[in-house]
Image (cartoon, rainbow, N blue to C red):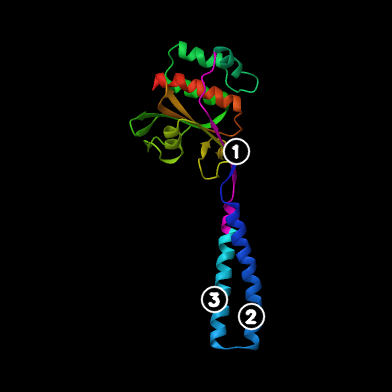
Amino acid sequence: MKPTPAHNPKTSLFISALFFTGIVTSGGGMFYLHSNPTAHVFSIVYAIVGVTLFMGIVAISILSRSKTHTIVYLEKKQDTMETTNQHFGSNSKLDKQVIESLFEKRADVQQVLNEICNQLQAGQAALYSRTERVIELKVGYALPTENKINYQVGEGLIGRVAAEGKTLYIDKLPDNYTTVFSGLGVTSPAYLCITPVKKGDLTAGVLEIASFSPISYETLLDLEQVSEKLAILI
């Protein structure tokens, strides 16, 4: 698990330093202009003031939009049956028996997705299928629109997971990433999990889940296992 800042802290520090330097320089320039009020000095001083104001606006803009998120990549591993059973432990929110019973009853993909979301108390979810270089939305949970959603492999977060074949977990989503509408109002999930849906070594689709609560590492491992069975349904 590696914390990754949404902006470069060195850039913010550099811009802030320039802004502070500009303030000091502008003050000195204004004092010098008072004692030597020539047109040449006037243009230089006011150019410095203008650049200083611009750097201040840039610094405030970057700092106001700064958010920290956590990205987790899970390397694909071949688990033994004993290890697989241990994954569904107290730290996982998924109920293995309930989900497996749906597969045994030949439930459709929408029912399975709904059950996963109910167990995780997810705000939204989407299951995508992949055809060559195109990733298409197959079924969704609490999505705001029925419009068809397509991605190219490598495009955006969905395409990135499809291309790399690794689970992506993001903590502290931007407020405008996704919105859930209900009779209780409008809310925004804060956590996002995107898992490749694999058939063997090939990525057949992508599972995206937006949650209001953190998703544990054990749950992420369980989602990878469940996604392997989802590959059969898409």
Q: Residues within 10 Å of mark 1 (few under 14, many from 20)?
A: few
Name the quadrant of the C terminus.
top left
Residue 208, position as x, y percentages in the image? 48, 32
Q: Is residue 1 left or right of residue 144?
A: right
Query: Mark 3 vs mark 1: which is more N-terminal?
Result: 1
View extreme (top): residue:
104
Quarter that holds the N terminus: top right
Q: Residue at x 51, y 14 (%)?
A: 100
Q: Which mark is residue 184?
A: none
- Front-lying residue, 49 or 147: 49
Q: Can you tell which quarter of the image residue 109 is in?
A: top left
To which residue does mark 3 refer?
A: 47
**Disc 2 to disc 3: CB gap under 8 Å:** no
The image quarter containing residue 165 is top left
Badge 3 amino acid: Ala
Q: Nearer the viewer, residue 184 or 149?
A: 149
| Disc 1 residue type (three-letter) | Lys
- Location of mark 2 (residue): 30
Task: State left or right for residue 26 relative to residue 128.
Answer: right
Going 58% across and 79% down the picture, which residue do you hit?
Answer: 45
Q: Counting residues from the N terminus, which is met first, the one under dot 2 or under dot 3?
A: 2
Closest to the observer: 44 or 100?
44
Look at label 2 and name its amino acid: Met
Q: CA separation, marks 3 and 1?
A: 42 Å
Q: What's the CA distance linking mark 2 and mark 1? A: 47 Å
Q: Specify the segment rendered in magenta.
A: 61-80
Does dot 1 land on a helix, a strand or a loop?
strand
Query: Residue at horizontal 55%, vertical 24%?
Result: 221
Q: Can you identify the residue that label 1 sits on?
A: 2
Vertical position of residue 176 compared to residue 80: above or below: below
